Image (tube, grey):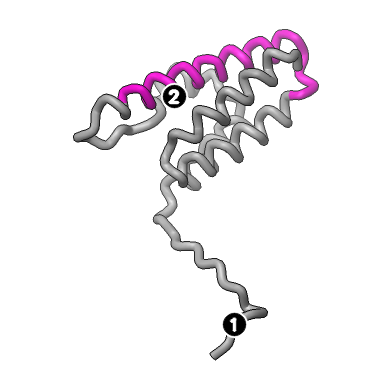
């Protein structure tokens, strides 16, 4: 993909820094996987891919700005996909979307990192 894709990739990762930690981790992982998968995309597919990610970046930027202005209510990030949009997805994309939804809706798990080798009683 062209250099514009690299700039978009960086911009999205920068935007993710403003998201809650769990969303940031999930979003970063997903963006990295998708951009990696589309490195060798043909011109038409690359154009669609970049257009969708540009739309995503604009939406996230708008929602981050709204979150900064609205200190009373918790911001909900993302959008509800229309049935028309879902019908345009390939089976593989539907599977990825389901995995993403499952990951995003998992109950919060605490992760504890301990130094077992240094643990003394």
* Residue 88 x/y as whole percent: 54, 18
* Residue 70 x/y as whole percent: 24, 28
Residue furthest toward the bottom?
121
* For marks 2 and 1 on the same chain, the one whose residue lies earlier in the sequence: 2
Q: Secondary structure at mark 2?
A: helix
> What residue appears at the point 67 percent right and 79 percent down from the top-left corner?
117
* Residue 74 x/y as whole percent: 27, 37
Q: Secondary structure at mark 1?
A: loop
Q: In the figure, 110 relative to 101: above or below?
A: below
Would residue 34 be found to the left or right of residue 86 on screen? right
What main secondary structure does the magenta stretch of the protein show?
helix
Residue furthest toward the right?
40
Front of the two marks 2 and 1: 1
Q: In the figure, 116 relative to 40: above or below?
A: below
Position of the C terminus by quadrant: bottom right
Q: What's the mark number on residue 80?
A: none
Magenta residues (range): 39-66
Q: What's the mark number on residue 119?
A: 1
To which residue does mark 2 refer? 60
> What residue appears at the point 75 percent right and 17 percent down from the top-left corner?
1
Magenta residue check for 42 = yes
* Residue 26 x/y as whole percent: 53, 42
Q: Observer-nearest residue: 105 or 95?
A: 105
Magenta residue check for 7 = no
Find residue 49 and report its image quarter: top right
Q: In the figure, 7 relative to 92: above or below?
A: above
Q: In the figure, 41 relative to 47: above or below?
A: below
> What residue appears at the point 51 percent right and 67 percent down from the top-left corner?
112
């Amino acid at each position: 993909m062209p250099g514009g894709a690299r700039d978009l990739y960086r911009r999205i990762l920068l935007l993710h820094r403003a998201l809650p930690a769990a969303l940031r981790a999930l979003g970063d992982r997903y963006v990295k996987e998708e951009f990696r998968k589309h490195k060798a995309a043909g011109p038409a597919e690359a154009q669609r891919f970049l257009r969708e990610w540009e739309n995503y970046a604009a939406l996230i930027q708008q929602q981050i700005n709204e979150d900064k202005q609205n200190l009373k209510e918790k911001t909900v990030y993302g959008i509800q996909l229309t049935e028309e949009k879902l019908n345009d997805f390939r089976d593989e994309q539907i599977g990825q979307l389901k995995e993403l939804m499952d990951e995003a809706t998992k109950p919060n798990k605490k992760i504890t990192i301990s130094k077992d080798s240094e643990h003394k009683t």
